[in-house]
Image (cartoon, rainbow, N blue to C red):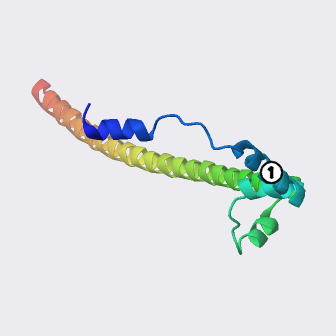
Amino acid sequence: MDLFELELERRLARREPPRGFSNKVMARVREEIREEPGEASRARTARPRRIGVRWLSDALSWGRGGRKAWTWGVTGALAATLAVGAFVENRKVEQRRRAVEQAQAEQAEAELVDALFVTGAKIHLARERAGAWKGD
């Protein structure tokens, strides 16, 4: 081992606490308990307060659930909005598909009418030629 590692091992070696250490710790704990029983525990676990937002949370809370109810309400409203949006979009897609199918059907009908007209004209011409050939 080099000099650095030896020095580090020496400084991190286990040592006995000084005399009276545990008595000092216990005395400090007793002082904190005497001050106010719940205050010490609240001081350790207290979260920073948000100033100016509490009134909004109180105004939007629904009954006993408070923030949870408000959160579920917003979640439900978003889900309903998403469902309605999906339904409306599906209707639009269906309408576009039907319009395309209608246009294709009208075009096919027009082509069929033209084909029948041409076929009728050809049959008429064939009959005339057949009648002329037969001698009618």
Q: Position of residue 76 (x, y in %)?
A: 70, 50
Q: Position of residue 46 (x, y in %)?
A: 73, 58
What amino acid is at disc 1?
Ala
Q: Is residue 39 left or right of residue 24?
A: right
- Of the 4 image quadrants, the one containing the C terminus is top left
Which one is nearer the viewer's eye here, 46 or 119?
46
The residue indicated by pointer 1 is: 27
Judged from this view, the residue extending furthest toward the bottom is 52
Quarter assignment of residue 66: bottom right
Q: Is residue 13 left or right of residue 132?
A: right
Quarter assignment of residue 135: top left
Q: Position of residue 44 (x, y in %)?
A: 72, 54
Residue at x 29%, y 41% (from the top left corner): 4
Q: Position of residue 23 (x, y in %)?
A: 77, 45
Quarter assignment of residue 31: bottom right
The answer to whether one can see residue 111 in this image is yes
Residue at x 43%, y 41% (from the top left corner): 11
